[in-house]
Image (cartoon, coloured by chain):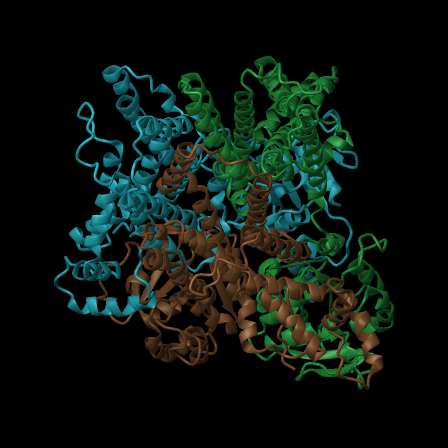
Chain colours: A green, B cyan, C brown
């Protein structure tokens, strides 16, 4: 009787557990390019291999050492089958259902577009052959990585499936091929895995469009104000300014506005919660989307700030600047009146530079702490401290830097009724800082903390529940700082 | 009989192993904010959910789709229970011990302070209900991440527990919610996990205080020497220098000293080992603490060096500098004597800049190799090569840069008996380099290598053992370079 | 009967599964330095420990709390044994085979050199004692990490072995000691693990040699052209130029050539595939090796570009530059003729700087996306987009930057028949860009895509197969962009 029990318990073990190091036999359905590349690699890693093909005798050159059989025979010979077949041809597998029973089916397919089919390829496969153990795996790798092993963006094999033993078997193969395995749970994650290789920076699109739009707007604004105006009114050709002077005005402006826009949705959300008196109401969609791309907006803002720094630092090697300085010196001598040293001017400009450098330093710190490996090493209290406390400090310092730049020139210098660009760019940051200041007032802060701990204002009957809630939520000692979440009631 | 064996073996399997994809039932104790948020997320991820509550009929609004039962009934219905209850109320669980037998209890609690209780919450829980399988998990996530899934610093779920099956079941849920799971071993790691979310850069405190202290000291030193002295002795108002000139003296000084202080403890430890003749004696506590924060000190030093670079690069756009250069040119013309080009001066200043840039480049390299993902990809021989060999090279080059800056002005230029600041800042680095040079002498190096391979001088009787030791330690071919460890005898 | 089944199934469980939290007993063979350090650490982590020694009564001081027995007795007492013994002494283990049967043997050994023995230490051990379960582990850690727990480059324990239960037992110990475990598959990976700690940037050697060679060549070329020529022909001592001016010519030249050399092998490979009409032929070895170090070449190119940026930015604070500017101004006044502002000159130089900054920005982006944690977070479509599309854009912009620098001075300015250095450095990049342009021609691009999807020209008979292939390869929707792989036919 114990004889009967044993085989079963063994069949549950991952295939590689066998102490007998006889080379394991795997099967690949499909003798196309993908099947050939994968087979090559499996053979090199010490597996035995059999191909399943519709025309076993005329399927072209395959890696030496591999056998080719009919689908039926191949399926019967191995306990794990890679499907290197296009989804459109899965149907033929239905007729193989008896042979595929209790086999591990590895679905490596991808689609050409998102949402081409109502269900994920792997889920469709599982539905076709309900008694097989379908595992979605390897589809996030490039063909290059499947042929040659791990390289840069191809170190990780994501897999998912409903059977943990099947997943373990596939994971063993993947580690043997040199990859790192990340288990994404049950087969319901298959769609996510299938969408992954198709994506091209989805979360960067909105921020990039925004940055592009702001850049274009301020470029033309400044073009009119600095170049066209001078040409029309004074007949001067300032067009060479486009390359450096204009760029060095556009970049910091866009950077500061983008940084402020990172912190605006959090402030809006807080006021919304205060107004509604609860955190259990869903935010409007635009606010949700805005909050989800704050990191990308911040990184773009940092990129623009870095360009601003480089453009500023090359100022003294520009031909135009050198020419002007020399011309200035010469005119002083010609007119025989030396300008006096202005201590206020020295204080102001040096402060301006110094504050700017400190702001940029903090900016960089925010960027570095956004690197995945750094943020993973932080506790979220630390991460919140950097991104929220230091973030607002950065915004404040950079805004202050711009005010110092403007100094006393805020209310004149209009050209064609257009205010200087730095005035325009200060609107959003000043507003965000002001609103944040309001939120920091003790009375407002206290209400908000209550709400974020689960308290609800519009619920006058159950006072008992409130007390219950406040005690329970102490479990999570830190009221959430970055911004509240969407919870559908 | 085999019928009887089967149910048992199944109960050991992680819950998600069941090929039957019926949605799994989980239980949450506690209907507070945390319980509600977690429940919401579990329901969204496809689990069925039952709440256990003291007052099942008056516990306020819960996520739609969840049942509410008494604690007893809820515990009986599910095999895995999340405890979203404050530690102070764990006692009531004792009465539920029969229902909780063999159940997986997930302790997600945190405390408001470290060391509030003699034992970790999860260990206390295990002691209360010895027959349950307690798993500590999810407590390092923010409430935001529990509600909305993984985000920046919230990708990883740390868990620990004494039962691997229970851990596997919790790990499956965590991956299904989208998190990456890191197993921290048995329940004795619970305290560490509970302390993690409370920490705020503990290992950065000493270095930050040190940097702050050095910055303050040198700021006031230079304030007196450069500003107050000029005002008192010469009546000149140099105060504007504070913003850039002073800062650009303080930052490099602090940076160089901090870098030297990274390498000083290793040198001290080596001499201590040479003096003691063994590596099996514990270092004094201060030395241990010092050695543990070298990385943070180095990164702060890099931050200060970066500020120094930026402050240096803006020099030529400063109003003061432009004014001085123009005034210089004008005075040359007025007095009609042009200064002659000084080749030595050109060599010296260019060398000074060039060496500085190379030093900063190496500095950056050290910083980049400290990024977790980069250092993880290095073998420790490579890491040691960069941090030790290139580290000392960086220290040497930066010290040399400072000597070039000083040039021949070392022994005069005292003001009020205060030497120039760069002289002060050279003391520690020169000393470290000199001591390191001593350690590299062949005879000293040989003794030290012996000691670090386990040889002990003060043990004259067993010559046999020594020979044994030297052969065994060849297993680890690289004598440890960075610094020796604390081993209590 | 079920009584007989149980013990077996338990013996398959990892050792830590036992709900009984009694401290587990481990064994260490070898009382040398490594054995002592590891034992210390295991005891601190709550394990009980027994040492196996040849002379149990005279093996010197061991960590307090550990027992010392003969090898036989020690082996019998524990189910898991760490081997802290040099490989040369493994033979004595053969006599212990009966005691070691079914035990987990952890091989932590390393060799002093690569390829010292025909087989890996762990495989040799497994061959000696076939009935033990050998696990290779912990050998990639430094002695320091074994004594004191994880630190920077020592967070990960790589392990491999043929038995998953044995690996699980070792993994449990490693996580309990605080390490992260990475399973590298079966024991055939042991050699790789044993080679890992011996390596010192193997993949960086070729790029570093190349960079060094190019740097040396251009340094001497420019030394002759800029310094020696001026000295011989004009008797001027320009030697001070070596430190900054020469360096700032050498660095960008080497950087641009290295960047172009990153993209040249991909272009060569594409033409080779076009010429051969198949992707199933192995590339020549030199091309393979070249392609494998492109990332390192790119990072070195970025390092040189960064130096170029810093060297450029310090130009205006150089003594020589300030002297020249002042002398220029003075001579204008003396000769009483002010130079006129040249708009073309302003346009040209500003464009030159602006394009350079944008190129450097893209360069940095390429570098950041090469960080392991960043590239892991990218889908490979995204990674390919950055490294290939943005990479070529970077190459184009940097080449354009250099053309703008040259402007109209390309065909004169020869000295001793030596063309200016920027002309030399433009050869390779221009060629690469030209060839890439050819590859982008629709007709060429189409053929290449076909070939990379598995199509073969030199195979006229089986038209059927071709159609089969093109449908199969749609599984992997993205034709591989970076460069084709080696597949032995």
Front residue of this view, candidates B357 and A87: B357
The x and y percentages for residue A127 are: 83, 60
Q: Position of residue B230 (x, y in %)?
A: 27, 19
Figure check: C231 above or below B89:
below
In the displayed structure, B242 sits above or below A179; it is above
Q: Where B285 falls versus B248 (above or below)?
A: below
Q: Residue furthest left?
A: B460
Question: In the rendered image, is residue C315 in sight?
Answer: yes
Horizontally, residue B285 falls left or right of residue A167, namely left
**Front position in the image: C147 or B55:** C147
Which corner quadrant holds the C terminus of chain C? bottom right
Q: x, y percentage for residue B82?
A: 63, 39
Q: Position of residue C305 (x, y in %)?
A: 49, 52
Above or below, B50 relative to C181: above
Q: Quadrant of the N terminus of chain C?
A: bottom right
Q: Is residue C53 left or right of residue A421?
A: left
Task: Using residue C34 as the reference point, say whether residue A323 is left or right of it.
Answer: right
Residue at 25% in and 20% down: B229
User: Residue A186's image quarter?
Assistant: bottom right
> Total marks drawn?
0
In screen coordinates, is A293 left or right of B450? right
Front-most of B419 and C367?
B419
Q: Is residue B124 visible?
A: no
């Amino acid at each position: 009787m114990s004889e009967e029990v044993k085989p079963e318990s063994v069949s549950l073990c991952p295939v590689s557990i066998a102490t007998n190091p006889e080379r394991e036999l795997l099967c690949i359905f499909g003798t196309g390019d993908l099947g050939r590349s994968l087979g090559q690699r499996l053979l090199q890693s010490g597996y035995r291999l059999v191909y399943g093909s519709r025309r076993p005798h005329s399927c072209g050159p395959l890696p030496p050492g591999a056998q080719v059989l009919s689908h039926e025979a191949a399926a019967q010979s191995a306990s794990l089958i890679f499907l290197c077949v296009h989804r459109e041809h899965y149907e033929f597998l239905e007729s193989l259902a008896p042979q595929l029973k209790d086999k591990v089916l590895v679905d490596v397919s991808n689609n050409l577009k998102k949402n081409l089919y109502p269900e994920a390829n792997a889920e469709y496969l599982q539905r076709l052959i309900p008694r097989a153990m379908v595992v979605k795996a390897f589809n996030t790798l490039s063909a290059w990585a499947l042929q040659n092993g791990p390289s840069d963006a191809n170190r990780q094999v994501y897999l998912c499936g409903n059977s943990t033993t099947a997943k373990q078997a596939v994971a063993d193969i993947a580690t043997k091929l040199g990859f790192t395995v990340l288990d994404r749970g049950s087969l319901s994650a298959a769609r996510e895995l299938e969408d992954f290789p198709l994506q091209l920076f989805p979360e960067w699109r909105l921020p990039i469009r925004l940055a592009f739009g702001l850049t274009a707007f301020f470029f033309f604004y400044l073009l009119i104000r600095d170049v066209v105006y001078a040409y029309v009114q004074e007949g001067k050709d300032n067009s060479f300014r486009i390359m450096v002077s204009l760029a060095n005005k556009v970049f910091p402006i866009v950077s500061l506005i983008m940084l402020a826009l990172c912190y605006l949705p959090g402030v809006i959300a807080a006021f919304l919660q205060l107004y509604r008196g609860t955190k259990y109401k869903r935010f409007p969609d635009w606010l949700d989307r805005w909050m989800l791309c704050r990191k990308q907006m911040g990184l773009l803002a940092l990129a623009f700030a870095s360009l601003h720094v480089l453009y500023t630092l090359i100022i003294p090697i520009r031909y135009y600047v050198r020419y002007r300085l020399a011309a200035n010196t010469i005119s002083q001598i010609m007119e025989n009146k030396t300008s006096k040293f202005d201590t206020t001017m020295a204080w102001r400009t040096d402060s301006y530079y110094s504050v700017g450098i400190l702001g940029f330093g903090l900016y960089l710190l925010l960027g570095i702490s956004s690197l995945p490996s750094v943020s993973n090493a932080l506790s979220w209290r630390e991460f919140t401290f950097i991104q929220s406390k230091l973030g607002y400090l950065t915004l404040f310092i950079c805004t202050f830097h711009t005010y110092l730049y403007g100094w006393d020139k805020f209310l004149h210098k209009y050209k064609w009724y257009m205010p200087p660009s730095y005035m325009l760019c200060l609107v959003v940051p000043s507003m965000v800082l002001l609103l944040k200041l309001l939120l920091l007032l003790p009375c407002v802060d206290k209400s908000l903390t209550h709400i974020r701990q689960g308290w609800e204002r519009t619920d006058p009957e159950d006072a008992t529940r409130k007390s219950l809630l406040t005690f329970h939520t102490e479990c999570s000692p830190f009221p959430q700082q970055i911004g509240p979440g969407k919870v559908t009631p």
